[in-house]
Amino acid sequence: MKYWKKYTKEEQNKRIDDALSKNVNFLTDVSLGYPASKLDETVFSSNAPFLKDSPLLRSFVANPNHIGCHTTGISETAFSGTHEIEREVLQVLAVDIFKCKDGNFDGYIATGGTEANIQAMWIYRNLYKREFNAKQEEIVIICSEDSHYSMPKGANILNLDIVFVPVEFYTREIEEAQLNQVVNEQKEKGKKYFIVVSNMATTMFGSVDSPELYAKVLLAQKVDFKIHIDGAFGGFIYPFHKEKTAVNFTNEHINSITIDAHKMLQAPYGTGIFLCKKGLMKNTLTKEAQYVNGMDLTFVGSRGGANAIAIWMILFSYGFYGWFEKISILLMRTKWFCEQLDALNIKYYRHKRMNIVTIHAAYIPDEIALKYDLVPDTHDGNHKWLKVVIMNHVELDDLMALIDEIKISISNSHS
């Protein structure tokens, strides 16, 4: 690891205080032109004694604005200190985790995976229009039927067509013949430019698409394509398996990646991440944002800097080896749970690099699913799958309790 270190609490405190000292201080600095201030003193006192032990809360009260993209061009100088914290986070993620070359990435801390996915689609739509003179009706988003709802949401916002590739019911994999057929059909409809969203752990199954399969088919079909990886759930677990992977920026066809820090990283909600290869962010420059120093390249605009600091603190509290150990424990628990299901001959889906186990609903009575908050693939009463996610708070005792109730249910059904 080049940038991902482990820092003590004292080192973290010092680094964040240094960053905040480089930002505008609304209490002491003459800053008349900003439509902002620190949080309201009536509710959020900056003199509360507990703040000295919490750099995150101090940054929350200081209220830095991270509008714009701080990996390219210039940014608002009033918050330069915490912008640097955001760049350090993105550097760890892009270079150390997703194997991008130094200086060859851009990105920002988004509000979540939904925004980050839409940012990617927005970039590629504009790229096709500006560099290929593509017509709106010639562009299509393509992804698997298991993809997150942010894809159809983005298609709706961007006024783009979207097509879903069927997956095999049990393996949740895209089959080459089906993908070929879908691409052929889209070409016949006049589609020439494909925005591919390839999943690094789908929300329901934790299944992982093959970006190489997309590239193979689309190259053979002689159409233009850009591949975005939706790693909203899988981004902080999939890369940490003992087996190597090329689902990262070393793959010439992968241009951008979404990650959610408020899932596996356990950061506060509202902390997604968008990463892309250098040179792509310019496609979403909003020239009309001239009052913003450096103008704006992001979907959301103003963003709270405390979110970037929260991610930074978690990453540097663990370091690479600490995080690898944490993920390894979760994967061992997941493996153990699957072994219990195997012993009961219960059918389920699980990707070996993931901590999601999705069980055939026929094996789980509704009252057990409700008691343990198992999530169905649909809430219309016709669900076929129920999901268990082995997160940090899920202990073996919790999983064993579920297994015991399933055993009783099976025993009762046979009596």
Image (cartoon, rainbow, N blue to C red):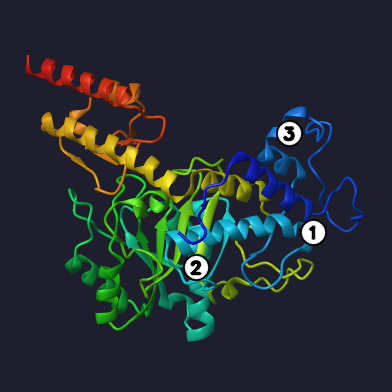
* Tag 3 secondary structure: helix
* Tag 1 secondary structure: helix
The residue tagged 3 is 51
Q: Is residue 196 left or right of residue 34?
A: left
In depth, the one of 284 and 315 nearer the eye is 315
Whole-percent x and y of residue 51? Answer: 73, 33
Q: Earlier in the sequence, mark 1 or mark 3?
A: 3
Whole-percent x and y of residue 42? Answer: 84, 31
In depth, the one of 203 and 142 nearer the eye is 203
**Compared with residue 97, is residue 6 higher up or lower down, i.e. above or below?**
above
Kindly report the distance in space between the C-alpha atoms of the residues bearing marks 3 and 2.
35 Å
The residue tagged 2 is 276
Which image quarter holds the N terminus? bottom left
Q: Closer to the observer: label 3 or label 2? A: 3
The three-letter code of the residue at mark 3 reads: Leu
The residue tagged 1 is 78
The three-letter code of the residue at mark 1 reads: Ala
Structural crowding at the residue carrying mark 1, measured as other residues with C-alpha within 10 Å and reported as few (<14), some (14–19) or many (≥20) = some
Q: Which mark is residue 391?
A: none
Q: Earlier in the sequence, mark 3 or mark 2?
A: 3
The three-letter code of the residue at mark 2 reads: Cys
| Quadrant of the image occupied by residue 379 | top left
Kindly report the distance in space between the C-alpha atoms of the residues bearing marks 1 and 2.
26 Å
Q: Does residue 383 appear anywhere in the picture?
A: no
Whole-percent x and y of residue 315? Answer: 52, 48
Whole-percent x and y of residue 321? Answer: 42, 48
**Is the residue under label 3 in contact with that under label 1 (CB below 8 Å)?**
no
